[in-house]
Amino acid sequence: MQRVPVLACVILALAAPVRADTPSARPVMVGGDGEIDACPSLGEIVPLRKGGDGFVAVRAAPSRRAREIDRLKPGRALLLCEDSTDGQWVGVVYAEPWGGAVVEDCRVSSPVEGRPAAYDGPCLSGWVARRYVMVTAG
C-alpha cells in the first residue's frame, strides 16, 4: 500500500471544492444613516457553556453553512453593525488580538454619510450567531 505524505493530504484538503449548498460570502455593511455611528452598538461574546468548543465561529455570511473565517473567545469586544434579515445573525467588526489594536481603531465609531457600504477598514469583520452576542452599549 502506498502512503500519501501528510503535507499532500493537507494540500488536498485545502483544495477541496466548496459544497454546492455553501452560501456565498456576504460583506458586513456599515454606515448610511449619517446621524449615528457606522456600527451603532458595542457588544461582546457571551460566556459559553462548560464542555463546549470554547469559541464562537465567525462566518463569511449569516448562515451556519457559510465558511468559518475566524473563532472568537468569550469576552471578545465587537462592534455590531447590521442584523441579518431573520435576526439570527449580526454583522460584526472587531480588532485583531495582536498588535494592541482595540475596536476604537476600526474606524466605524462615527457617522458615515451616503449609502451603506461593505466594511473595508483596518479590522476584521464577519457574521456571528446573535445568541452568542451580548450588547454592552448602544
Image: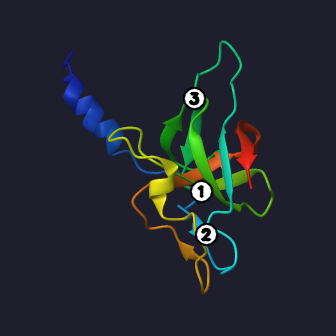
Q: Residue at x 43, y 55 (%)?
A: 123
Q: Residue at x 54, y 35 (%)?
A: 72
Q: Which residue in the rendered view is the most extreme toward the right?
A: 86
Q: Is residue 62 visible?
A: no
> Does 50 appear above or below 112?
above
Measure the alpha-carbon separation of dots 3 and 2.
26 Å
> Does 113 appear above or below 14?
below
User: Disc 3 or 2, which lies upstream in sequence?
Assistant: 2
Mark identifier at residue 61: 1
Measure the alpha-carbon separation of dots 2 and 1.
19 Å
Mark identifier at residue 7: none
* Residue 7, image x, y percentages: 21, 29
> Does 20 appear above or below 108?
above
Q: Nearer the viewer, residue 17 or 123?
A: 123
Measure the alpha-carbon separation of dots 3 and 1.
18 Å
Mark identifier at residue 38: 2
Q: Residue at x 32, y 41 (%)?
A: 99
* Residue 94, image x, y percentages: 51, 49
Q: Are marks 2 and 1 in contact (CB under 8 Å)?
A: no
The kind of residue on which mark 3 rests is: Phe
**Residue 134, quarter of the rendered image:** top right
> Does 34 appear above or below 121?
below
Q: Nearer the viewer, mark 3 or mark 2?
A: 2
The kind of residue on which mark 1 rests is: Ala
User: Disc 3 or 1, which lies upstream in sequence?
Assistant: 3
For disc 3, the marked residue is: 55
**Residue 83, quarter of the rendered image:** bottom right
SS class, disc 2: loop
